[in-house]
């Protein structure tokens, strides 16, 4: 069975957790600075991490019940930093106004 990289909060030091915030990429929409918000703790039944852009306020929330906050921060950071390699070259072709006969 594979163990998640951040499964045990006690195994991850505080300096490593604070380093996660430094590794967040800028907002994919406006290039603004992201912030990480926490809800819950290791004693609460549900915990969540929200990463939100301070400028355009787009946000992404990841939640967990089974794993610790350190694991959740790792997952949220990985999801925020994931970018598409698709290049947009132009608009889609317009649909024809004619009805098929």
Image: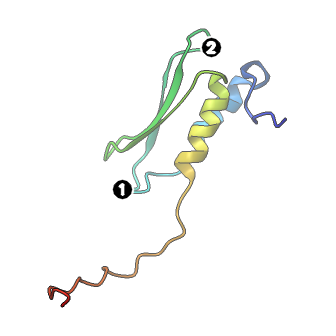
Of mark 2 and mark 1, the one earlier in the sequence is 1
Badge 1: how crowded within 10 Å, few (<14), some, or many (20+)? few
- Residue 65 figure quarter: top right
Q: Secondary structure at mark 2?
A: loop
From the top left corner, tell me how far across and down residue 39 is, in percent. 48, 20
From the top left corner, tell me how far across and down residue 23 is, in percent. 60, 45
Horizontal side, residue 23 vs residue 34: left or right = right
What residue is shown at x 53% (from left), y 18% (from top)?
46
From the top left corner, tell me how far across and down residue 64 is, in percent. 58, 26
Q: Nearer the viewer, mark 2 or mark 1?
A: 2
Between 85 and 14, the residue placed more toward the observer is 85
What residue is shown at x 30% (from left), y 79% (from top)?
91
Q: Secondary structure at mark 1?
A: loop
Horizontal side, residue 84 vs residue 54: left or right = right
Q: Which quarter of the rendered picture does the N terminus lie within? A: top right
Q: Which residue is mark 1?
A: 30
Using the numbered discs, state the Cα–Cα distance from disc 2 to disc 1 in whole angstroms.
33 Å
The correct choice, above or below, for 85 with respect to 78 in the image is below
Horizontal side, residue 25 vs residue 14: left or right = left
Q: Which quarter of the rendered picture does the C terminus lie within? A: bottom left
Horizontal side, residue 2 vs residue 98: left or right = right
Q: Which residue is mark 2?
A: 42
What residue is shown at x 62% (from left), y 39% (from top)?
75
Q: Residue furthest front?
A: 101
The correct choice, above or below, for 38 with respect to 29 in the image is above
Can residue 24 be seen from the camera position used here? no
Badge 2: how crowded within 10 Å, few (<14), some, or many (20+)? some
Image disc number at residue 98: none
From the top left corner, tell me how far across and down residue 80 is, in percent. 52, 47
Can residue 34 be seen from the camera position used here? yes
């Amino acid at each position: 069975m594979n163990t998640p990289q951040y499964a045990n909060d006690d195994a991850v030091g505080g300096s490593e957790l604070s380093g996660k915030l430094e590794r967040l990429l800028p907002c994919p929409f406006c290039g603004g600075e992201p912030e990480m918000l926490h809800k819950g703790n290791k004693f609460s039944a549900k915990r969540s991490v929200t990463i939100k852009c301070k400028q355009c306020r787009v946000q992404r929330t990841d939640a967990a019940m089974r794993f610790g906050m350190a694991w959740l921060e790792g997952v949220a950071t990985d999801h925020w930093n994931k970018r598409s390699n698709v290049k947009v070259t132009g608009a889609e072709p317009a649909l024809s106004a004619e009805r098929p006969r």
